[in-house]
Amino acid sequence: MKILVTGGLGYIGSHTCVELAKNGHTVVIVDNLSNSKLETLDRLTEITGARMAFYRVDVTDYRATAEIFAAHTIEGVMHFAGLKAVGESVEQPLAYYYNNVLGTITIAKLCLEYGVNKFVFSSSATVYGDQASPLYEDMALGQTTNPYGETKAMSERILTDVTKANPRFAVSLLRYFNPVGAHESGLIGEDPNGIPNNLMPYVTRVAKGLLPCLRVFGNDYDTPDGTGVRDYIHVVDLALGHVAAFENLQPGVSIFNLGTGKGTSVLELVHAFTAENGVAVPYEIAPRRVGDVATCFADASRAARDLGWRAKRGIREMVRDAWRFESATKGTKGTFPFVR
């Protein structure tokens, strides 16, 4: 099938493009490069042997995005494009509501206009709010703790209503947890523009000497070592989950958690990185961040049962592959704000 991947040069999108190509699908990528790099397109070609069609377009631009639908016979969409930093969303809520919600509306509207009935949405575990883990798909959407999570919850509600009004429309809402790691080739990985907003790029850049110290936000949570506990999942496992969801789409809405089902604390991840790679990661403790929760991990049994998918890679593979990618990329020392 020919699949439009929005945000396809980003971290998760690029890995999913690889797995789609490996499974025989033709990929069309749209990305505004706000948090990705054009060189990733060449790296995708190197990995897959296929040159993917690419459009530098912001999906909130209806007219420009419509031209892509008109130029290709799109048979399905994977929608990754969106702003994704929890802390930044608290500081810039209007930007997040505009970009993330309008982008979803634009893509859904064009799907209906061009008869595209297969839609996989990149959602997030943040839609559960601060509910007790493990988190199940049948839980009600919680009181989200930040604007980023609220944009994902709003997008889920919008897509659910679209399926009610359009019985042939098939949507899979993928609520995933904390992706880390990189492709085993070392060619693609998490390489954000500007200030990193996720934990692992900060860990790798501190290890590389590009940043002086990792700032760990909070060590007074009700967790084994006081630091936040998350369900870290290897990005390749996550990409394979998207492919499985797409290939099992049925009319209506399906919801799947994509996680390992196991929580790991921030400090456990840092210590695992040092043990696996033999590289020290200096850190210091800072106050909690607004919008963070203490513990968040999945029950992923539905994906195993209905999609035949489960995460296979552990923390060791995650930190090893992340460091391989960081070690292969060029960088210069400089001053960066602390981790968000």
Image (cartoon, helix red, strand yellow):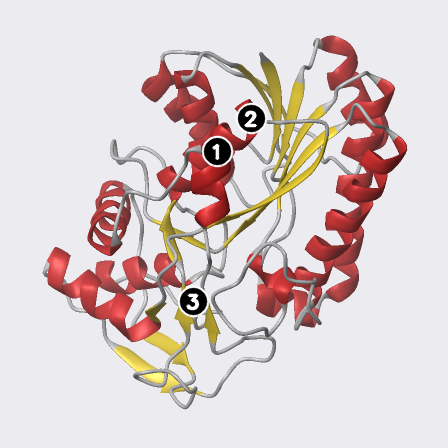
Residues tagged 2 and 1 counted as in contact (Cβ below 8 A)? yes
Q: Which residue is mark 3?
A: 336
Say above or below: 103 vs 198: above
What residue is rendered at 37% in x and 53% in y? 260
Q: Is residue 87 left or right of residue 191?
A: right
Q: Which mark is residue 307?
A: 1
Mark 3 or 1: in front is 1
- Please tell me whether mark 2 sits on a helix, a strand or a loop: loop
Measured in 3D between alpha carbons, the distance from the residue under mark 2 to the one under mark 1, in whole angstroms, is: 7 Å
Q: Nearer the viewer, residue 9 or 331?
A: 9
Q: Which residue is mark 2?
A: 248
Residue sitting farthest toward the front: 305
Amino acid type, residue under disc 3 in the picture: Phe
Q: Which mark is residue 99?
A: none
Q: Residue 263: x, y in percent?
A: 36, 66
Corner quadrant of residue 262: bottom left
What residue is rendered at 35% in x and 44% in y? 311
Corner quadrant of residue 292: bottom right
Name the image quarter holding the N terminus.
top right
What residue is rendered at 82% in x and 16% in y? 114
